Image (cartoon, rainbow, N blue to C red):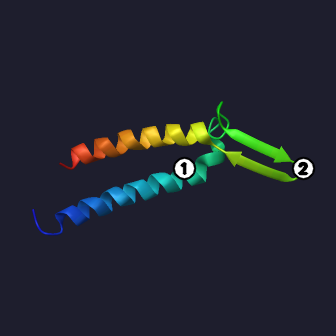
Amino acid sequence: MSAFGGVGKFLILAGVFLILFGLLFIFWERIPFLGKLPGDLMIQRGSFRLLIPVVTCIIISFVLTILINILLRLFR
């Protein structure tokens, strides 16, 4: 393996992560359960609205962990 092989793998994984993260932002409102799961906190007072998606973040973290582990195993 060349000296830049590790950097190349890192850049590929970072690119995949950025693409997935970007798609999540684009389609956030079209996915019906994101931000509306039991355990997600929503505070609404008048025109002020605060959403803290605790459970949604845990699920997204779990899915991303599995995807990253699969990708790491493929590139070994």
Seen at 64% across and 33% down, the residue is 37
Seen at 86% across and 47% down, the residue is 45
The residue pinned by badge 1 equals: 24
**Depicted 39 relative to depicted 9: above or below:** above
Whole-percent x, y for residue 13 in the image: 33, 56
Q: Residue furthest top?
A: 38
- Mark 2 → mark 1, Cα distance in angstroms: 28 Å
Q: Nearer the viewer, residue 45 or 27?
A: 45
Rendering quarter of residue 53: top right
Identify the element where label 1 is drawn.
helix
In the image, what residue type sits under mark 2? Answer: Gly
Seen at 68% across and 36% down, the residue is 36
**Depicted 43 relative to depicted 10: above or below:** above
Q: Of marks 2 and 1, which one's residue comes earlier in the chain?
A: 1
Q: Nearer the viewer, residue 28 or 52?
A: 52
Identify the element where label 2 is drawn.
loop
Q: Quadrant of the N terminus?
A: bottom left
**Label placed on residue 2:** none
Whole-percent x, y for residue 47 in the image: 87, 53
In the image, what residue type sits under mark 1? Answer: Leu
Q: Residue furthest bottom?
A: 3
Mark whose residue sits in front, 2 or 1: 2
Whole-percent x, y for residue 72 in the image: 26, 47
The residue pinned by badge 2 equals: 46
